[in-house]
Amino acid sequence: MQVQRRIAVGARRPLAVLSGWALATLILDRLTKWWVSTSVQPYDSIPVIKDVFHITFVRNTGAAFGLMPGKQPLFILTSSVVLLGIVGYVWLMRPAATWLNVSLGMIAGGAFGNLIDRVVTGRVVDFFDLVAIEFPVFNIADSAIVVGTSMLVAWVLFGPESEHARRPEPDDAVGGVPADASGGDGTHTTEFL
């Protein structure tokens, strides 16, 4: 019996995908924070698109987007728990899906980037300033955490069910093989979800 394979949505090396995204996020975050810290004076604002988007150097003692200022021990603890949770989840579950690993990598890289600032200086360097909508100033790490979390929520809501959770309905099975796994020519296909 011939096995026909479709394009896999799972990564060949899922840990490399997660680690690569985490490292890329962390490096980009650290480099941009270093550039802003060495090139812009605190509270100075450089218009990139006047009255729309500026680079504004702010030292934030709060959470992402300046929320809850002055609660550093809580944010250090929260970031540490998030990072340990991701490591624990990856160690136990070994997720293979690329989408899931990218989202976890972005969250881990962003959390670690802001954690470094909080531990070393007690303040996070923020600089993206969406002046047009009066949005709080933020950084690469904040962006990565928000995008990664949004991807994770999308995965939980709309991602494929795990292979263990899916059981063929009695009417769907043909000879013990789920109807959706059989190709029209009698060959079987395997998809990696």
Image: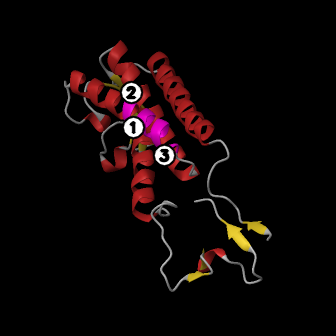
Residue 54 on the magenta span:
no
Q: Quadrant of residue 89?
A: top left
* 37 over 148 or under it: above or below: above
158 or 169: nearer the viewer: 169
State the extent of the magenta-drawn residues as a range.
84-94
**Of pointers 2 and 1, the one earlier in the residue sequence:** 2
Q: Position of residue 12 (x, y in %)?
A: 68, 46
- Name the disc covering residue 142, or none: 1
Q: Secondary structure at mark 2?
A: helix
57 or 108: nearer the viewer: 108
**Of pointers 1 and 3, the one earlier in the residue sequence:** 3
**Residue farthest to the top, as pictured:** 120
**Residue farthest to the bottom, as pictured:** 171
24 or 31: nearer the viewer: 24
Quick check: marks 2 and 1 in contact, CB under 8 Å? yes
Identified by mark 1, the residue type is Asp
In three-dimensional space, the C-alpha distance between marks 1 and 3, rounded to whole angstroms, equals: 13 Å
Are there few (<14), some (14-19), or many (20+) residues within 10 Å of tag 3? many
**Of pointers 2 and 3, the one earlier in the residue sequence:** 3
Q: Quadrant of residue 80?
A: top left
At 35% from the left and 24% from the top, the residue drawn is 124
At 48% from the left and 60% from the top, the residue drawn is 164
- According to the image, label 3 marks what residue? 103
Quick check: marks 1 and 3 in contact, CB under 8 Å? no
Quadrant in the picture for the C terminus: bottom right
Q: How many marks?
A: 3
In three-dimensional space, the C-alpha distance between marks 2 and 1, rounded to whole angstroms, equals: 8 Å
Q: Is residue 192 left or right of residue 57?
A: right
Identified by mark 2, the residue type is Asn
